C-alpha cells in the first residue's frame, strides 16, 4: 500500500507540473526541471552562444506579454491616494533604480541614465508636467485603470510594491527636473 501511495503521489506531481507547463505560452523561457523554473538568456561574449540562467524567482505565475498567453489577469484596480503623500524621494529613487523592485529604468529614461528603456515615456523633467500626486499614485498602482491597453506592470494590484513604496516613488518622480 505504501508503494502504491507513493506511486500515485508521484504521478499526481508529474501531472500537476505538466498541467501547469501546458498553460504557459510556448515562447517563454521555462524549464520545470530547474529550481526557479524561469530562465533568462545571457549572451557569451564573442562566442555566438547564449547561456540560459535561472531567474532569481519563478515568474511563471504571472501573465506574460506573449500573444500566446491566455491566462486571465487580475482586473484593473482603481485606488485613491488617502491623506498627505508622505513620500521619501530619496527612498523612491532607490526603489526606482532597484532591478528587483521598481526597475523603472528598464522602460523609462531617467535623469543621469545614459541608456534608459524606451518602453515608456521619459521621466526626465517629470515634475514640470504638473500631474497631481493622486494621478501618479494611480499610474504606479495600476496604470490599466487609466489606460486599459497599458503594458506598465500593475505594481499595487499585483502586490509587487506596498503602498509606502509607491508613495516614495511618487515623491521621487515629482522631484525630477
Image (tube, helix red, strand yellow):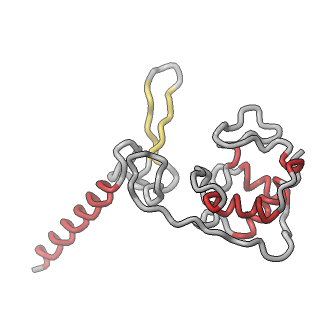
Decide if residue 4 is on the left or right side of residue 141: left
- Furthest residue toward top: 46
Decide if residue 20 is on the left or right side of residue 103: left
Q: Position of residue 95 (x, y in %)?
A: 73, 56
Q: Quadrant of the N terminus?
A: bottom left
Q: Position of residue 115 (x, y in %)?
A: 72, 32
Residue ID at (42%, 45%): 67
Residue ID at (43%, 62%): 72
Q: How many marks?
A: 0
Decide if residue 155 is on the left or right side of residue 11: right
User: Against 73, is 125 above or below?
Assistant: above
- Furthest residue toward bottom: 1
* Quadrant of residue 88 within the rendered picture: bottom right
Residue ID at (48%, 62%): 73
Residue ID at (38%, 47%): 68
Q: Quadrant of the C terminus?
A: top right
* Quadrant of residue 156 within the rendered picture: bottom right
Amino acid at each position: 500500500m505504501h508503494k502504491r501511495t507513493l506511486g500515485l503521489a508521484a504521478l499526481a506531481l508529474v501531472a500537476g507540473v505538466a498541467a501547469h507547463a501546458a498553460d504557459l505560452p510556448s515562447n517563454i523561457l521555462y524549464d520545470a526541471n530547474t529550481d526557479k523554473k524561469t530562465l533568462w538568456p545571457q549572451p557569451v561574449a564573442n562566442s555566438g552562444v547564449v547561456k540560459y540562467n535561472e531567474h532569481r524567482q519563478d515568474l511563471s505565475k504571472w501573465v506574460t506579454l506573449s500573444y500566446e498567453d491566455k491566462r486571465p489577469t487580475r482586473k484593473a484596480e482603481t485606488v485613491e491616494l488617502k491623506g498627505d503623500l508622505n513620500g521619501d524621494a530619496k527612498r523612491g529613487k532607490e526603489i526606482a533604480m532597484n532591478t528587483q523592485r521598481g526597475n523603472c529604468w528598464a522602460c523609462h529614461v531617467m535623469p543621469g541614465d545614459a541608456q534608459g528603456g524606451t518602453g515608456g515615456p521619459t521621466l526626465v523633467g517629470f515634475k514640470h508636467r504638473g500631474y497631481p500626486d493622486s494621478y501618479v499614485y494611480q499610474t504606479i498602482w495600476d496604470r490599466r485603470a487609466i489606460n486599459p491597453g497599458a503594458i506598465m506592470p500593475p505594481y499595487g494590484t499585483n502586490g509587487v510594491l506596498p503602498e509606502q513604496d509607491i508613495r516614495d516613488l511618487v515623491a521621487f518622480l515629482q522631484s525630477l527636473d
